[in-house]
Structure formats: structure tokens, C-alpha cells
Image (cartoon, rainbow, N blue to C red):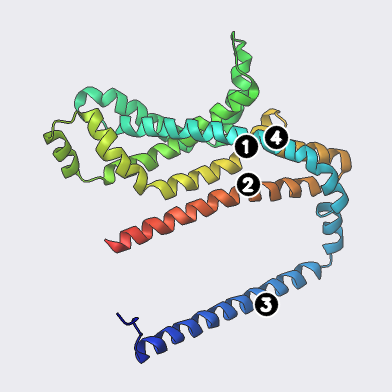
């Protein structure tokens, strides 16, 4: 069988698309270069640039502070894993409780609703201070460390946000699917586990990941309670050198830490949009 040969019109169409792609890339590169040049010239040409450079961008101080900030960043990573898992579990539990039907479950729904309203309204820094400074004052036996209490404060706050995301996903599943599952003999827990939750989690995966990215930044707030994480290490280095460069080092490390998670979020969002468009 002879190989397929595209027609003249098909080859011209492919060549036109290729030229348009090259043209778009060149225009994007040129505009990015022009904008970047204007920004660099405007910032470095400012009257106070030299003073800002000395205070925030000192290479020697950055090199000296980097080991301690990196050590503190490892604490942030561990705290992020603990808080992300805890907030996801708490959020899913609250969402399921809020979607329970029947008057007998009203107290449970009311408690879950009150919880989400309260912790979505409270600033995270206040929750952090109450748990890390107020709770230890009770002097109870077996009190966890300040770091654990700070992590619990983040779990309590972000669990409320994630609960609303999970609830939106659960309520997006059409009621006919629940009725179909129940008509097949599945119990309510089995319906939630095998029918509702898999679809709900897949639908709300992008906003869930966005909230985890926000959590990744806020784990640095635990430094206010005393643990030496990346931000606290930068603060100590700044106090020793009277220079703010360690804060820039910590900020850059946080950005580098967030980039993979942000990339995954964008990929999941794009995939969900393509799946939706294909229907």
C-alpha cells in the first residue's frame, strides 16, 4: 500500500501554522525582552538603587546565611507535609458531615457549619498565637511542642477552607447518581466512597492544590511562635548582620519550593479544562 501523501492544501495549511507559531514565539520573546529591559533600567536607575542593593542583595551575606536558611527550610517542608495531610483529612471529614441529610444529623451539620464559618473568618495569625502562646499556658500534662501546636493551628484554619472546596465538589455530583447507586443496593457510606467522592475530588483538584500552595507560604508564620524555620533563620541572620539579604534568600527558596507544586496545579487545571471541553 502506498504511503499517504498529504494534499497541497494540507501542506500549505501546515506550513502556515508553523509560520504563525514561529511568529508568535518571536513576538513573545521580543516583548518579554523589552519589558524586562525597561524594568531593569527603571529599577537600577533609581536614585536609591545602590542603597537598596547593599541592604537587600549583598552576595557575601547571602552566601553566609544560606546554610542556616536551608536548614530552616527543611523544617518548613516537614511542617508542610504534616499540615497538608491534616488539612485535607479534616476538610474532607467536615465536608462529608455538612452534606449529611436528615433531621437527626442537624446538630452535626450545625457544628461543622459553625466550625467552617469561624475558622474561615479568623485570621490565621490569631489562631497561631492562641494555640502556641495561650494553650501552653494551661500547663497540661503531655502538652505537645510549640511547633506541633503551630502546625495544628494551620491545620484547623486551612481545614475549614478545604472543607468548602470538598463540599462544592460533592454537591456538583448529580443527585441521580446517588439515587442510582442506592438503587443498586449500595449503602450511603459505600455510595460516598465509590461513586461521589472519586468524582468530587477529581473535579475540585485544581482549587485544592491552590489552597495547598497558599498553605506552603503560610507555614513560614510558625516562626512567630519561636521555631527556627527558614524565616526565623533569616531573621536571626539579619539581626547579626544588620542587612536584609537573608530575607531575600528565604523568599527565593520559598519560591523555588512552590514552583513544582504550582506547575502541577497548572497541569491539573489545564487537563480538567480539556476534559470539560471534550464533552
Disc 4 target residue? 229
Q: Depth-wise, is mark 4 or mark 2 nearer the camera?
A: 2
Q: Where does the image place residue 24, in percent across and percent down from the top left?
A: 53, 79
* Quadrant in which residue 182 is drawn: top left
Q: CA distance from mark 2 to mark 3?
A: 29 Å
Q: Quadrant of the C terminus?
A: bottom left
Front residue of 82/37: it is 82
Give the mark, 4 or 1, whose residue is nearer the N terminus: 1
Q: Quadrant of the N terminus?
A: bottom left
Disc 1 target residue? 77
Q: CA distance from mark 4 to mark 1?
A: 10 Å
Q: Depth-wise, is mark 3 or mark 1 nearer the camera?
A: 1
Please state if 110 lies on the left or on the right of 48 as rendered.
left
Q: CA distance from mark 3 to mark 1?
A: 37 Å
Disc 3 target residue? 34
Give the mark, 3 or 1, whose residue is nearer the N terminus: 3
Residue at 60% across, 32% down = 79
Mark 4, Cα crowd under 10 Å, few <14 / some 14-19 / many 20+, is many
Q: Which mark is residue 257?
A: 2
Give the mark, 4 or 3, whose residue is nearer the N terminus: 3
Q: CA distance from mark 4 to mark 2?
A: 14 Å
Element assignment for label 1: helix
Element assignment for label 4: loop
Please state if 74 lies on the left or on the right of 101 as rendered.
right
Amino acid at each position: 500500500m502506498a504511503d499517504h501523501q498529504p494534499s497541497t492544501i494540507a501542506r500549505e495549511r501546515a506550513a502556515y501554522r508553523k509560520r504563525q507559531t514561529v511568529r508568535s514565539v518571536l513576538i513573545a520573546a521580543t516583548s518579554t525582552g523589552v519589558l524586562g529591559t525597561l524594568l531593569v533600567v527603571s529599577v537600577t536607575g533609581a536614585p536609591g538603587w545602590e542603597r537598596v542593593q547593599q541592604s537587600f542583595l549583598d552576595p557575601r551575606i547571602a552566601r553566609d546565611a544560606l546554610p542556616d536558611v536551608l536548614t530552616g527550610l527543611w523544617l518548613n517542608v516537614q511542617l508542610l507535609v504534616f499540615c497538608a495531610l491534616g488539612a485535607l483529612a479534616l476538610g474532607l471529614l467536615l465536608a462529608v458531615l455538612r452534606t449529611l441529610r436528615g433531621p437527626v444529623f442537624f446538630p452535626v451539620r450545625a457544628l461543622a457549619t459553625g466550625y467552617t464559618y469561624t475558622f474561615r473568618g479568623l485570621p490565621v495569625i490569631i489562631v497561631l498565637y492562641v494555640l502556641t502562646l495561650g494553650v501552653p499556658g494551661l500547663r497540661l500534662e503531655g502538652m505537645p511542642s510549640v511547633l506541633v501546636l503551630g502546625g495544628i493551628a494551620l491545620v484547623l484554619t486551612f481545614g475549614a477552607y478545604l472543607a468548602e472546596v470538598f463540599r462544592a465538589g460533592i454537591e456538583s455530583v448529580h443527585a441521580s447518581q446517588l439515587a442510582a447507586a442506592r438503587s443498586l443496593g449500595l449503602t450511603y457510606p459505600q455510595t460516598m466512597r465509590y461513586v461521589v467522592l472519586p468524582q468530587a475530588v477529581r473535579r475540585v483538584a485544581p482549587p485544592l492544590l491552590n489552597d495547598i500552595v497558599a498553605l506552603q507560604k503560610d507555614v513560614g508564620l510558625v516562626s512567630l511562635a519561636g521555631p527556627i524555620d527558614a524565616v526565623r533563620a533569616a531573621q536571626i541572620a539579619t539581626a547579626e548582620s544588620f542587612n536584609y539579604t537573608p530575607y531575600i534568600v528565604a523568599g527565593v527558596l520559598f519560591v523555588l519550593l512552590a514552583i513544582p507544586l504550582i506547575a502541577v496545579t497548572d497541569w491539573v487545571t489545564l487537563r480538567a479544562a480539556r476534559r470539560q471541553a471534550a464533552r
